[in-house]
Amino acid sequence: MPMSSTAYAVTNKQLEEKKKDIQEKRSNVQSEISQKKDDLVQIGEEKSAVQKELDKLELTIADTENKIKEKEAQIASAKEEINKLQQEIAVLKEQIKKRDELLKERIRSIQENGGVINYLDVLLGAQSFSDFINRVSAVTSFMEADRDLLRMHQEDKALLDKKEAEAQKQLEELNKKLADLEGMKKTLNGQQVKKNKLLEELKEQEKDMHEELLVFEDEAAILAAQEKAIKREIEAWNKRQRELEEQRKKQANAQGNKVGSAPEITNGVFMNPATGRLTSHYGQRWGRLHSGIDIGKGGRTEAVPIVAAASGSVIKANFDRSYGNVVMITHVIDGQVMTTVYGHMESLSVSNGASVEKGQLLGYMGNTGNSTGPHLHFEIHHGPWNGSRSNSVNPLRYVNY
C-alpha cells in the first residue's frame, strides 16, 4: 500500500546510504592499511640495505685498523732501523772526523816540508840503487795510502748522506701511509655515524607506522562493527515495516474502507503528519487561541493515515471530550523536550506508553470530539503539554502546508 511503501522506501534509503557511507570509509581505511603495510615493507628493505652497508663499513673499518696497526709496527721497525743507522752514522762520522784530522795533519806536514819536494829529497838521498828502489817503493806506498785515505773519506761521506736520505725517505713514506689510513678511518667512522643515524631514523619511522597501522586497524574494526549494526538496523526496519503493513491491512479490512497514502518521511526535525490541505492556521480564533493547525480531509472517501511527525514515546492515546480520539507524543530533540498532539482521529493504532518511529501510523483522520468536520488538528509544544497550551508554537515553523 502507498503509506507503507513510502515509509519503507525513504527510511530504508537513509539506512542504505548510511551503510554505503560506512562501506566507503572501510574501503578508504583498508587502502590506508594496505599503503601502511607497503610502507613498512619498504622501510624494512631500507633498514636491511642500511644494515648491510653498516656491516660492510665495520669490516672496512676493521681492515683499516689492522692496516694502521701494521703501519704502526712498520714505523716502529723503521725507527729501530733508523736508530741503528744513526749509530752507524755516528761511527761513520767519527771515522770521517779522524780522517779529517789525519788528512789535515798530512796536509800540514806537506806544507811544512815543501810538499812533493820532500819525496824527491827522499829519493835523491839514496845511498845505493837498492836503497833507491826501496825509497821509491816507500814513497809510492805513502802516496797510495794518501789516495786510499781520500777515497775512503769520500765514500764514507757519500754513504753517510745516502743512509740518512734513505732513512728519512722511508720514515716519511710510512708516516704518509699512516696519515692516509687514519684519514680513511676518520672518513669511515663519519660514514658509520651517518648510517647509524639513518638506521635510527628508519626504526623511528617504522615505529610510527606500526602505531598508525594499529590506529587504522582499530578504525577498520569499529567500521566493520558499525556496518554489522547498520545491517541489523536495516533488518529490524524491514521487519517493523512488515509488521506495520500487516497492522495496516488488518485495520483496513476491519474498516472495510480504502486507505489513502501517508505523507513522505522527510529529513527535517518533524515531517508532515498527514496529507491534505491546510484549513485553519495557528493563532487567535473566535476570541481564543487556536493552538495548532488543521489539515482537512477535503472530501476524500478513503481512510487518511495520520503518522508520527517524529520518533518518540506516546504519553496519551485515548478519547478526549475536546480532542476526540487523540495521541500525544513526547520527543527529545537536540536535548529539548517537545510534544506533538494529533486530535479528532477516527481510530487509534497505538496505545499509551508505546514507542513510535517517525512516519509510523497513529490512526486515521476523523471527526471525533469538538469538531465541525473530518480533519486532523495538529499541535507542537516546546516542552510538555499543559492545559493552557501556553508553550504551544506555530507548527508551520516545522512542517509545510
Image: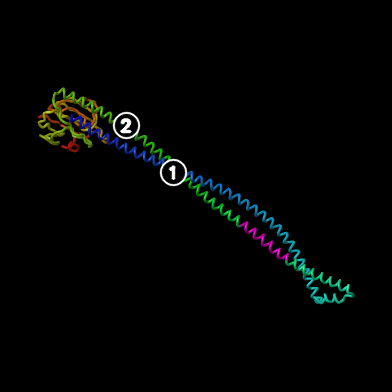
- Label 1 Cα neighbours within 10 Å, binned few <14 / some 14-19 / many ≥20: few
Residue 307 lies, in percent from the top left, at 19, 30
Give the label on residue 23, or none: none
Q: Is residue 392 left or right of residue 207?
A: left
Residue ID for mark 1:
42
**Whether residue 104 can be seen here:** yes
**Whether residue 294 can be seen here:** no
**Residue displayed at 76% across by 68% down:** 150
**Residue displayed at 17% across by 27% down:** 363
Q: Is residue 163 magenta?
A: yes
Q: Amino acid at mark 2?
A: Ala
Pointer 2 or 1: first along the chain: 1
2 or 1: mark nearer the eye: 1
Looking at the rendering, the stretch of residues picked out in magenta corresponds to: 155-175
Tag 1 secondary structure: helix
- Report, in whole angstroms, how far the alpha carbon at label 2 lies from the one at label 1: 37 Å
- Image quadrant where residue 359 sits: top left
Q: Is residue 57 magenta?
A: no
Residue ID for mark 2:
229
Q: Is residue 57 left or right of residue 329?
A: right
Against 46, is 354 above or below? above
- Image quadrant where residue 166 sits: bottom right
Q: Main secondary structure of the magenta part?
A: helix
Residue 340 lies, in percent from the top left, at 20, 32
Question: Considering depth in this image, is 77 or 379 the residue closer to the camera?
Answer: 77
Question: Considering depth in this image, is 275 or 111 the residue closer to the camera?
Answer: 111
Tag 2 secondary structure: helix
Residue 223 lies, in percent from the top left, at 34, 35
Q: Quadrant of the N terminus?
A: top left
- Label 2 Cα neighbours within 10 Å, binned few <14 / some 14-19 / many ≥20: few
Question: Considering depth in this image, is 87 or 375 the residue closer to the camera?
Answer: 87
